[in-house]
Image: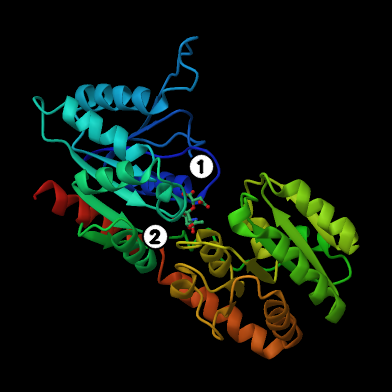
Amino acid sequence: MKIGITCYPTYGGSGVIATELGKELALRGHEVHFISYALPFRLNEFIERIYFHEVEMTSYPLFEFPLYSLALASKMVEVIKYENLDLLHVHYAIPHATSAYLAKQMLADFKDLKIITTLHGTDITLVGLEPSFLPLVKFSIEQSDGVTAVSRFLKENTLTNYDTKKNIEVIPNFVDTELFKPNGHSGFRNHIAPNGEKILVHISNFRQVKRVPDAIKMFEKIVKELPAKLVLVGDGPDRSECERLCRDLNVCDNVKFLGKQERLVDILTSSDLFLLPSQAESFGLAALEAMACGLPVISSSVGGLPELVKHNETGFIAEIGDIDRMARYAADLLGNERKYKIFSENSRNRAVNYEKSKIIPLYENYYEKILNS
Ligand code: GMT
């Protein structure tokens, strides 16, 4: 197949999934054309049958706001027409599904281009619900030829909140379990925890929805129980507040802010426990990658997280903001070697269910189904 993929190219789960999907599809013989404003960050090597088309933006004094959605639609039309794409798969509904709809209409005389939209999270649960976007998101979902969601939670949430009867296929996120795998402890562990402290890790884009301060407050309680270090990976609007909180709680010596990192696998394989106390999380890809490396997860019980993190098997879940409970779970688990080992193995085994070779064919079959519909 000749497949167009549009996604956000920067750090973020939807971009990661879109890029890894494209790479796998290319390895399986499909031709994949990425259309976005920048090269997706995990697409930093040459791969046969993958092409990148950059959406160029011009500024004009009259346009107070950049017209990206329109420029994207124009680029989609160009690529679909001249590369003769079979289908366009857009990740994150806003504005990608709307631009795709526009492109489809513009090409109506040329071909019946099939559009598939994958819903990822805040496009549905947060931004999409804003009154200025809701009618547009609902329309764009309903006009897509196929719609997938990354968890059962997200599917149900979409059907309810957008009052739609659209058929939505659940295709969960996936992980490369050959790359993300337990790997002994690298030099990173010795560097961060030279005295054998336990390492807790959180990875996110430091937005409010991730509740990173909760991870720090949790850590402050845990470190009173056992020697530990907290590694915070990523960057975003809440980082300064988090750094201030560390100073206020007097935990700076034990908390390391690493900023944005590419080799997550090295950090994960050197760590002991993954923290994800989010306010909303439709799937929790970062948790899946951690589990694949054998890390149990302590998370909130929101969104799609209970579908991934099995309470009392691969980690623990608790109500949003219940820092005391999460800290207790973490300290108990880290303090019990036998139990920790079982949880670590359970995590790895559960992650293997989401191995990319099991999930990519679900997308291929779905593409076939939509193309033949
Ligand atoms: O909203 C974000 O955190 C970013 C967003 C994205 O689209 O990049 O993440 C969402 O999609 C990921 C990949 O499907 C999921 O693993 C995340 O759970 C989801 N984030 C939220 O629902 C908050």
Quarter holding the N terminus is: top left
| Secondary structure of the residue carrying numbered label 2 | helix
User: In the picture provided, is 190 more to the left or to the right than 183?
Assistant: right
Q: Is residue 107 left or right of residue 183?
A: left
Q: Residue furthest top?
A: 61
The answer to whether 47 appears left or right of 324 in the picture is: left
Residue underneath mark 2: 356
Q: Residue 166 versus residue 223: which sits nearer the camera? A: 166
Query: In the displayed structure, would residue 165 be above or below residue 302?
Result: above
- Mark 1–mark 2 Cα distance, whole angstroms, equals 16 Å
Relative placement, left or right, of 249 versus 205 is right
Name above or below for residue 73 compared with residue 212: above
Q: Percent x, y for residue 26?
A: 33, 42
- Can residue 216 be seen? yes
Query: Which image quarter: residue 245?
Result: bottom right
Q: Is residue 29 visible?
A: no
